[in-house]
Amino acid sequence: MKERLIVFGRIASMLSLLVGVSVVLVSCDGKQKKETAATPSKQATATISSASGSEVTGTAVFKQSGDSITLTVEIQNAAPGLHAVHIHEVGDCSSPDGKSAGGHWNPTEVAHGEWGVGEFHLGDIGNMTVGDDGTGKIELTTDKWEMGTGSIRDIVGKGIIVHADADDFTSQPSGAAGARIGCGAIALAASQ
């Protein structure tokens, strides 16, 4: 009789274990869940001030989401038409003509061009359309930049430049975009 109780106890334990495993398997639904750590979002900004005697003002905001960074540039007080927007090597807008910002930011050392078409500088943003009211906006989202990493692809510490004319996307080294009419230094937002 004692042996039967021991056998019965073992069978009950095995059944409990089997039921527990079945519940776990059913609740998993046969699907493996992948846990991912949330990438903290970062933001960098630049206040665009007038250069070369213009009255242009504006902002550039870089927002990181995962591996992508979205740049939004908005300006006011510009002449209607197309204006090239570029990231330049240095976040220094101390000279009246904006030339203290250096040349185009080109860490990959390729020819100037149009973003996404053949070769182009990482600072070749594109042309912004400014309306009759003197305002314009351009946006670009990319995974080619980094923010606050210190790598060669890091946009922090660079300058954002608005030019008087459109970028022709072919003239070297800067697209014949004319004078620098707006300049801002890119820095991580204060909460970073």
Image (spheres, rainbow, N blue to C red):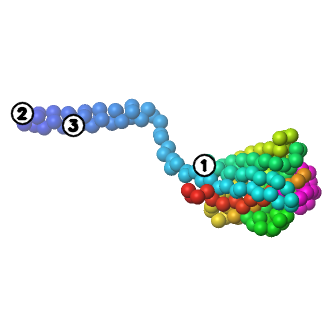
Q: Residues within 10 Å of mark 3 (few under 14, many from 20)?
A: few
Say which of 9 and 25 sits in front.
25
> Element under label 2?
loop
Estimate the x, y position of residue 90 in percent, counting from the top left.
Answer: 75, 66
Residue 97: name its quadrant: bottom right
As displayed, is residue 74 above or below residue 47? above
Does residue 56 show up magenta in the picture? no
**Crowdedness near tag 2: few (<14), some (14–19) or many (≥20) residues, C-alpha within 10 Å:** few
Q: Amino acid at mark 1?
A: Gly
Which image quadrant: the C terminus?
Answer: bottom right
Q: Amino acid at mark 2?
A: Met
Residue under numbered circle 2 = 1
Horizontal relation, residue 188 to residue 99: left or right: left
Q: Which residues, given as a range, are shown in magenta? A: 166-181
Residue under pointer 3: 13
Q: Which mark is residue 66?
A: 1
Quarter residue 155 falls in? bottom right
- Residue 25 % position (x, y): 38, 34
Mark 1 → mark 3, Cα distance in angstroms: 48 Å
Residue type, label 3: Ser
Q: Nearer the viewer, mark 3 or mark 2?
A: 3
